[in-house]
Image: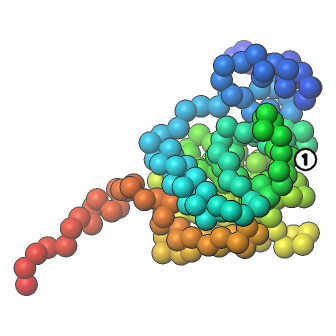
Amino acid sequence: MTLALRKPMTFAEFLAWEERQELRHEFDGVGPVAMTGGTRAHAAIQRNLAFALTARLRGQPCQYFGSDLKIRTADDHIRYPDGFVTCTGGDNASRMVADPVVIFEVLSPSTAASDRIVKAREYQAMPSVQRYVMLEQDRVGATVHVRSGETWTLEIIAEESVLTLPEIGVSLPLAELYEGLVFEADQEEGPAPEGG
């Protein structure tokens, strides 16, 4: 078996290279990693997240951004999270943010392992990040990493729960982020029988 070895890139080389690309790429410290397309469920969760947070943050100093802006992690990696909130201003022409407060990733089969381990470590190493929310794609649920001083705790949020984000003064029903989606378990239950 022949394995292709990637020639390592520096952070500066990656940024210059990415400027010339049509598609977005993350940077893992060695080289570019192409961003793949998502599913309908993934897109619906991202849309619902944008609507929910943008409305709740209107008029506040914190702002929600989607996956068009990149984040520079503490170890000079580049990530394009599915969404994040930052509470500091920035240049309108900027394509990179260094100080997100809350980060969201929608888990998919191809990225879940990286989101749960690699990105969790990277995001936790960023002093500005107070909460990292991983949203399930195939059911209503979330895993939330919460900073508490120098340590992190883990919360599992179930279907009927409220997602609380005190760092940005927002609480919302988790189910709101899944509006418009029907999962297999929901279809199997079906409507209640009529009659008596």
Choose top left, top right, bottom left or bottom right for residue 55. Answer: bottom right
Where 27 sits versus 90, above or below?
A: above
Choose top left, top right, bottom left or bottom right for residue 86. Answer: bottom right
> Mark 1 is on which residue type?
Ala
Q: Position of residue 87 (x, y in %)?
A: 80, 58
Instruction: Locate the C terminus by quadrant.
Output: bottom left
Q: Tell which of 137 and 165 is nearer to you.
A: 165
Secondary structure beneath dot 1 equals loop
Q: Position of residue 59 (x, y in %)?
A: 68, 62
**Total residue callouts:** 1
Q: Residue furthest front?
A: 59
Identified at 91% across, 43% down, the residue is: 75
Identified at 90% across, 29% down, the residue is: 11
Instruction: Locate the N terminus by quadrant.
Output: top right
Residue that numbered label 1 is attached to:
74
Task: Describe the colour scheme in one phrase.
Answer: rainbow
Say few, some or many: other residues with alpha carbon within 10 Å of mark 1 (under 14 / 14 to 19 / 20 or more).
some
Q: Tell which of 43 and 31 is nearer to you.
A: 43
Q: Position of residue 136 (x, y in %)?
A: 54, 56
Q: Tell which of 147 and 97 is nearer to you.
A: 97
Q: Residue furthest left?
A: 195
In the shown orientation, is residue 67 left or right of residue 51?
right
Q: Tell which of 184 and 162 is nearer to you.
A: 162
Q: Position of residue 189 (x, y in %)?
A: 27, 66
Q: Is residue 124 visible?
A: no
Q: Is residue 188 visible?
A: yes
In the shown orientation, is residue 41 left or right of residue 194?
right
Identified at 19% across, 73% down, the residue is: 192
Identified at 86% across, 58% down, the residue is: 128
